[in-house]
Image (cartoon, grey):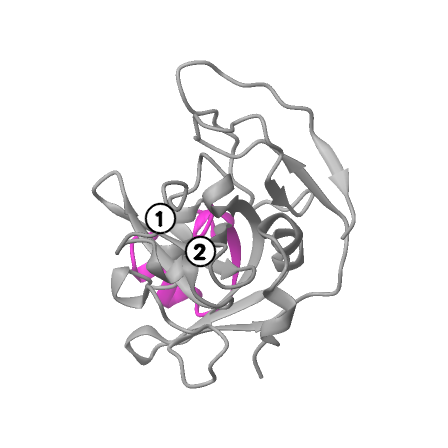
Amino acid sequence: MVVDRDLLTGTAVQTAPLLLGALVRSRIDGVPVLARITEVEAYEGERDAASHAYRGLTKRTAVMFGEAGHLYCYFVYGMHWCANIVCGEPDTAAAVLLRAAEIVEGESCARSRGAKSVPAAKIASGPARLARALGLSGADSGVDLLDERSPVQLVSLAPPGPYESGPRVGVAAAAELSWRFWLPGDPTVSAYRAGGRKRVGGTRQTGQP
């Protein structure tokens, strides 16, 4: 059973903490891999200078302007795919970047996609590793994660629990916003890296959805 779409129609900042502990299952090439999300980042569309949708609707970002629950994949550094879950109301272009996860099932398949020699906690630590572990690429952008027939599904949300927040990783614009959220103490959470020419500090915050 997949998640109710109405649970993803809040803003990205509201939705991001709700995705911590969520389960995402991919069946790319028919092989199931189940991941528990441990770290995410919120991007608020046209009001967020760090968002791909900041300058409006394009062919690349069209899926972000659609209904919540769809997958938005993009290519970065000419070599990696990253995966986001679209949220908010249609036309808001809000999305949550999946930054890290624990591989719960299908570890051997996830490793075969480029993580053969790393510790289990690092297989999906970082957005590129996470997308690769699930077998995601641009071909999956636009997939409805809430359709039981989809090759990638948002299977369930976890009960609300404690989380921490801080600045987003590697962004130069709006870098001061504490819109990255993670499960405290989880070994899969990626290391913080500031973006831009100047390192932007940020106070670690704790919260409860």
Q: Is residue 179 left or right of residue 51?
A: right
Secondary structure found at label 1: loop
Queried whether the magenta region covers residue 104, the answer comes back as: yes
Residue at the spot 22% in from the left edge and 44% down from the top edge: 79
Q: Is residue 120 left or right of residue 72?
A: right
Q: Is residue 188 left or right of residue 134?
A: right
Measured as percent of width and height from the top left, residue 31 is found at: 35, 77
Nearer the observer, 187 or 84: 84
User: Dot 2, how many residues are within 10 Å of its Cα: few (below 14), some (14-19), or many (20+)?
Assistant: many
Give the residues drawn in magenta, as a range: 100-125
Instruction: Say if mark 2 contacts mark 1, CB within 8 Å.
Output: no
Amino acid type assigned to the residue bearing label 1 in the image:
Ser
Instruction: Give residue 113's quadrant in the image.
Output: bottom left
Q: Is residue 74 above or below residue 136?
A: above
Measured as percent of width and height from the top left, residue 141 is found at: 33, 64
Q: Which mark is residue 84?
A: 2
Q: Is residue 155 above or below residue 158?
A: below
Residue placed furthest toward the left: 78
Nearer the observer, 40 or 65: 65
Residue at the spot 53% in from the left edge and 34% down from the top edge: 168
Measured as percent of width and height from the top left, residue 140 is found at: 31, 67
Residue at the spot 58% in from the left edge and 51% down from the top edge: 12
- According to the image, label 1 marks what residue? 117
Nearer the observer, 105 or 59: 59
Amino acid type assigned to the residue bearing label 2 in the image:
Asn
Queried whether the magenta region covers residue 190, the answer comes back as: no
Instruction: Give residue 62's quadrant in the image.
Output: bottom left
Q: Is residue 160 visible?
A: yes
Nearer the observer, 145 or 89: 89
Spatial separation of the CA atoms under disc 2 and disc 1: 26 Å
Position of the N terminus, as image quadrant, is bottom right
